[in-house]
Amino acid sequence: MVTRHPDTDLLVEYTSGSLSLAPSISVTTHLQFCENCSNAVDSLNQLGGDILEAAEAVPVCEDLFEKILLGIDEGSPESASPHGAKITAVDAISDSLPRYVQQFLPKGKLRWRFLSPSLRLATISVGEDRHELALHRIQAGGKAPEHDHNGEEITVVLTGCFSDEDGVYQPGDFIVREPGDVHRPFAAQNKECICLSVLSAPIKLTGLKRVFNPFMGFSPS
Amino acid sequence: MKNSQLNRLCETPMPEVQDWTACLKTIGDYQDKARFSLLFEHFSPRVKAFLIKGGHLNEEKAEELVQETMIKVWRRSSTFSPAQASASTWIYTIARNTRIDCFRKQSRENLESLSADDIYDSSYEDDSHYSSLVQIRRNDHIDQQLKELPQEQSEVLRMMYLQGMSGQQISDSLGLPLGTVKSRIRLAIAKLKIGFASTYKPD
């Protein structure tokens, strides 16, 4: 059962569109698991709709509707699920992840980087430079080294579970760590744990120096 | 369509639309252009206001995005489900996503073929475990209670939902601590009685 959720103000930023791309992906991922937050997001979108409805109207050009009619005659109606073709899970791990997450994975096999004997990381490129999106994989029974956080980190558990000093985290749990939070996550004995993580990257790094590692707390050198 | 045809459309006796959600459903079901023109008249000036409030758009670009938004409304109308959203909610999310994509293009973020529609997409949800009753439940009170919020709270919600500002940007703009902005958001949302799992968390 999901017990850790995004804060109200984060969901408000998410639904009002000011949250940037990688954190927004982490919120939508959480929604795949959480009926409560999905309902809250529906209500917040409705709030957006009500605010739109109450907005002071600004007149549009007289010929705009004609332009639109020309536009709609050129294209065909969109189908109900335009995204089906994008999913390209090619290995067992990708296949075990929520379908929503699969669409962001690189084509071809995930490239896992070694971080410690029980911890691997695969970065996901979504084309934004303020945050880094990645998958973390802790081996069954594995421990990640104790670490600090350089920036705010969001973690969403996808499969398996992990625990730290504060509790046990199940699939769907949405955990935010602030800079200075020190913890040492470890996976359950019987199953490996895969998480989606978002690290805020206030400093833009390039090339080989771009070593970002939310779980390990590597400082860029 | 020529102007003369448009004029004739306007002369066609059409009941005054009260229920935009039903109107949008009819547009989707029957590709009803006459009703679409009514929906357009009602929503496009509001969508334009929304786009202009977000800043960084000149008149011409705003019109272009209204056009883009309303074309999407038409094309996707057959997928609109009144059980999941009202017309204004649905149009709001389309306008919001259109604005996000426009800003990302302007800031030259590498789009990598990802659009806001992909990010917010919930079509992957296995809705078998969602009770249909929950989906149909509409919070009819939000609209009314929005009007009754203290001005300092409704101001923050408008800055977020109309202007697309983040909590930090509002904090900078109003010269208030971020914590104050966040507590106004939380108070407002609590008054609107929007159910949140996270509000039940002891903290």
Image: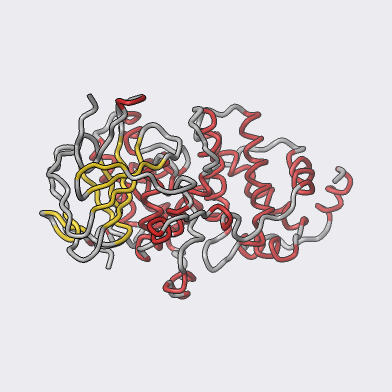
Left or right position of B108 against B44: left
Q: Is residue B119 above or below residue A204?
A: below
Query: Residue B35: image x %, image y %?
Result: 73, 58
User: What residue lies at 32% left-to-right and 34% top-to-bottom?
Assistant: B168
From where the camera sits, is residue B199 visible? no
Q: Quadrant of residue B17?
A: bottom right
Q: Residue at x 39, y 55 (%)?
A: A29
At horizontal 23% and vertical 40% (from top left) the residue drawn is B179
Q: Position of residue A65 (x, y in %)?
A: 75, 43
B202, above or below A196, in the image = below
Residue at the farthest left position: A165
Residue occupying the point 28% across, 64% down? A2
Q: Is residue A104 visible?
A: yes
In the depicted view, which residue is nearer to us: A66 or A82?
A: A82
Scheme of colours in the image:
secondary structure
Q: Position of residue A185 (x, y in %)?
A: 16, 51
Q: Quadrant of residue B101?
A: top right
Q: Horizontal placement of A131 versus B163: left or right?
A: left
Q: Can you say which quadrant of the picture contains the C terminus of chain A? A: top left
- Give the image quarter of residue A212: top left
Q: Is residue A101 left or right of residue A219?
A: right
